[in-house]
Image: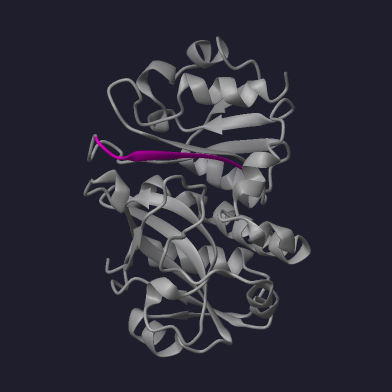
Amino acid sequence: MKKFFFLITLLTLSIVLSGQDNTPVTQKDVLHFFETKTYVVLDDNPVSDFNFKIEEQVKKYWKVTPYEFIDQKTFHLKRTDPNNSFLVLSETVFIEDNLQARYDFFSLLMGGNYSIIKSMPVLGAIPIGYTGAAQESSMYKLGAILKFLQAHVYLLKNNPEILKNDNMFKYYNDSQKSLKDKTLYLIKEEQAPELDSKPEIGAIYPYKIQFVSRTELEQAIDNNAENVVFLHKVGPEGTKKKARCFKLILSTNQELYYFDWHMISDKKPDGLLESDYKKIVKFDN
């Protein structure tokens, strides 16, 4: 799939696609977004898993603006119109890592008279996969991601002071919520090898966990299952050892409860680490 390419030069990253070339988002951008039409940019391959799933999920969950599905050629024609916004899959490289690792981010962009795509204001972005990994590792979570992006824009609208931060998603880390009364859904094959069973996790994490299939998690998202959160992990899925592992805990409706990332190594595998579980529990102590 041809994706839009971004070079990112951040020493730290929350979940915002940002960098020295992006135009900072203003409150005017946020307010104007609600007056735009959102164009969902599809894969050039008409039978791709992404196209099927994003069309299905946008029709089901995108409520904040009118929308239309377009191809990449049409995106280039429409992206300079400030009355348009875009949901796009973008390929991202963190140049300070000095690696060839590339990550797919699902991004909400504002249109306007910007000479290059990476200058377009980013209202929100979330890592969705590692470039080269199987798409099924994340496609089933698209519904929750769409819910979150919409809630995030409403958050910016009602709390414009968040835009003053260099990292607009710092808000979520600073206002971490308890998981004490939540059930954490996990996909077994997405866990680190030494922390992929209830006894191993239960030794350091006293709250409820449940191992589920991808289908069961997608059903929970569809049903807005009450008091259920899930791990959204983005890593190389065995295709590359040296890369970032992004770890997000989202609710089935629209909330973000936890975010962090680490560089994968022999001591820090591709998955939630013991330190992540301890950090989550520490919030309640």
Left or right: residue 160 compared with residue 100: right
Quadrant assignment, res 216: top right
In the image, residue 175 above or below residue 152: above
Quadrant assignment, res 84: bottom right
In the image, residue 87 above or below residue 102: below
Query: What are the residue bounds of the magenta stretch?
Result: 242-251
What residue appears at the point 65 percent right and 60 percent down from the top-left corner?
A: 164
Report the front residue among 153 and 19: 19
Q: Position of residue 38 (x, y in %)?
A: 56, 78
Instruction: Check if residue 247 falls in the magenta segment.
Output: yes
Left or right: residue 183 compared with residue 245: right
Q: Position of residue 20 (x, y in %)?
A: 42, 63
Which quadrant is home to the C terminus? top right
In the image, residue 138 above or below residue 280: below
Q: Is residue 226 visible?
A: yes
Q: Position of residue 62 (x, y in %)?
A: 62, 68
Report the front residue among 125 and 57: 125
